[in-house]
Amino acid sequence: MKWLDKYSDYTYALLRIISGAMLSFHGIQKIFGLLSAFHPTFGSQIWFGGIIELIGGFLVLVGFQTRCAAFVCSGMMAVAYFQFHWKFQMGSNFFPAINKGESAVLYCFVFLFIACRGAVKWGVDKGK
């Protein structure tokens, strides 16, 4: 499968762009209520999470300050998983498939990967 190596930077850039867009949309839902009936209280922890999703996701999407933005987003998703999904409960609630935390775990590690690689292609950072 070595023939796929020449596409790795392009597919990584697509992963970064799509992940940033998806996270940013979650922030738009929380902050502006777009396509969502849920409106967190201004200044609450969930509201601040929405701000991080909106701004951090957008920065990752455009590839500006990518490493820093992705690192913050990764940490925010780790907090979201531990505090709002797992809640440090044992038993079956330990598993992400049970506590509905799969996307939080996946986002956490995708953004950690992006923080390690940076923008690479198609970003304002130009491969930094």
Image (cartoon, rainbow, N blue to C red):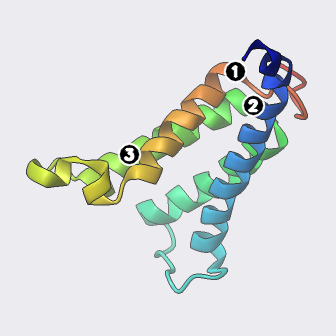
Q: Can residue 65 be seen here?
A: no
Nearer the observer: mark 3 or 2; the answer is: 2
Q: Name the kind of residue labelled 1 in the image.
A: Arg
Q: Is there a contact, CB below 8 Å, between mark 1 and mark 2?
A: yes
Q: State how far apart marks 1 and 3 are (Cα).
A: 22 Å
Q: Name the kind of residue labelled 3 in the image.
A: Val
Tell me if 43 is positioned left or right of 21 in this view: left
Q: Residues within 10 Å of mark 2 (few under 14, many from 20)?
A: some
Tell me if 20 is positioned left or right of 7 in this view: left
Q: Residue at x 34, y 60 (%)?
A: 100
Quarter occupied by residue 78: top left
SS at mark 3 in the image: helix
Tell me if 58 is positioned left or right of 44 in this view: right
Q: Can residue 25 be seen here?
A: yes
Residue nearest the viewer, comparing 63 with 94? 94
Q: Is residue 54 above or below residue 7?
A: below
The residue wearing badge 1 is 117
Label located before the other in sequence (1 or 2): 2
Q: Residue at x 91, y 34 (%)?
A: 122
Q: Name the kind of residue labelled 2 in the image.
A: Tyr
The residue wearing badge 2 is 12
Q: Is residue 65 above or below residue 50?
A: above
For the C terminus, give its image quadrant.
top right
Q: Which mark is residue 80?
A: none
For the N terminus, give its image quadrant.
top right
Q: State how far apart marks 1 and 2 are (Cα).
A: 9 Å
SS at mark 1 in the image: helix
Farthest residue to the front: give it.
1
Q: Residues within 10 Å of mark 1 (few under 14, many from 20)?
A: some
Label located before the other in sequence (1 or 3): 3
Q: Residue at x 86, y 18 (%)?
A: 6
Q: Residue at x 57, y 36 (%)?
A: 110
